Amino acid sequence: MAAGGLANPQIIAHLEKSLDYTIFDVKWIPCSARFVVVGSHARGTGALQVFEMGQKELMLSKKYEKKDAIKCCTFGATALQDRHLATGNFTGKMETWDLEKGDLPVYSVKAHEEIVNCIDGVGGLGVGIGAPEIVTGSRDGTVKVWDVRQDTYPVAKMQPNEGEAKRDCWAVAFGNTYTEAERVVAAGYDNGDVKLFDLRTMSVRWEHNIKNGVCGLQFDRKDILMNKLVATSLEGKFYTFDMRVQHPKKGFPCVMEKAHKSTIWGVRHLPQNRDVYMTLGATVQSVYGNIIIRKNEPSWTTTELSME
């Protein structure tokens, strides 16, 4: 990174590797120099591969091919000693895998009627408190919360009311898990809706429309009292919501920025400093897309944020 700090950041590629399938998600394996890649082969089967950081190259250490393409994955709900990966696939299944012997899933459930677009986990890896749970969002319009220690039924299910149109859920994120009882799920939909579900009261705590499909959601930290939530969208815009203050009518204040020239597929906060995060975009000119580093400025007080 340049001497000027985040004013002139430089991102240097450490290692690169070309793969022969479509990549949908990548996650670091906790407490290791390895990461897992999931996606879809051209023949429609799922790819699940583990790579290890070498001195000069990325080394493939595990390789599994699954019957169905895999769309998303998370380690958020696993015990640190297990490091089981939870995945969502194109046929609506949610499964967990032991990456050392990944031929058969440790847990499998038909979670949705259509593709599982997004997944997140909480309560695992020795971070925070509360039960280990997984949330999934699907094209079928439902958001479901799972406890893999229980049977194949969700512990919570959020779906449209009778007569309402089903919207494609593109993003989910856990947050506010600072006590045993408190826990919320943020969900983003193709029509621009962002909804905050309170799992303690089983109610919609807040909803807002950002006018473009919501491609990514993430709290700056999920194991503390809600602080900030970032939502990314189509057409290059992202929104930072201040979750510390909720107006009874206008909801949470927010800042909107246009960071990319096209879709922002996701957002990732730096674990060591929650004020630093990256937005993941795509450009028309480049097949590689682009990454932009952002930092929440101290001057972003609630009095200066927009109440859109």
Image (cartoon, rainbow, N blue to C red):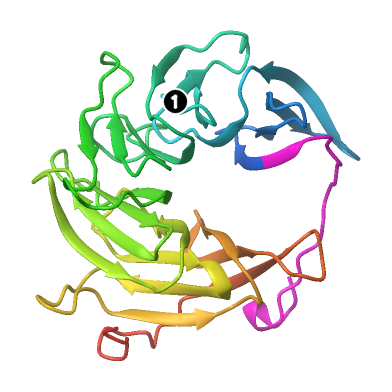
Q: What span is in magenta?
A: 1-23
Which secondary structure is most common in the magenta stretch?
A: loop
| Residue 104 versus residue 17 in the image, above or below | above
Q: For this view, does 222 lie left or right of residue 278?
A: left
Q: For this view, does 244 lie left or right of residue 136?
A: left
Coordinates of residue 74 in the picture (x, y in percent): 49, 35
Identify which residue is drawn at 26% across, 15% down.
150
| Residue 45 versus residue 173 in the image, above or below | above
Look at the numbered disc 1 and give the secondary structure of its residue: strand
Residue toward you, 55 or 99: 99
Coordinates of residue 76 in the picture (x, y in percent): 43, 36
Residue at the front extreme, as displayed: 163
Q: For this view, does 199 lie left or right of residue 110?
A: left
Residue type marked 1: Met
- Please tell me whether residue 203 belongs to the stretch shown in magenta: no
Coordinates of residue 107 in the picture (x, y in percent): 42, 14
| Residue hosting label 1 | 94
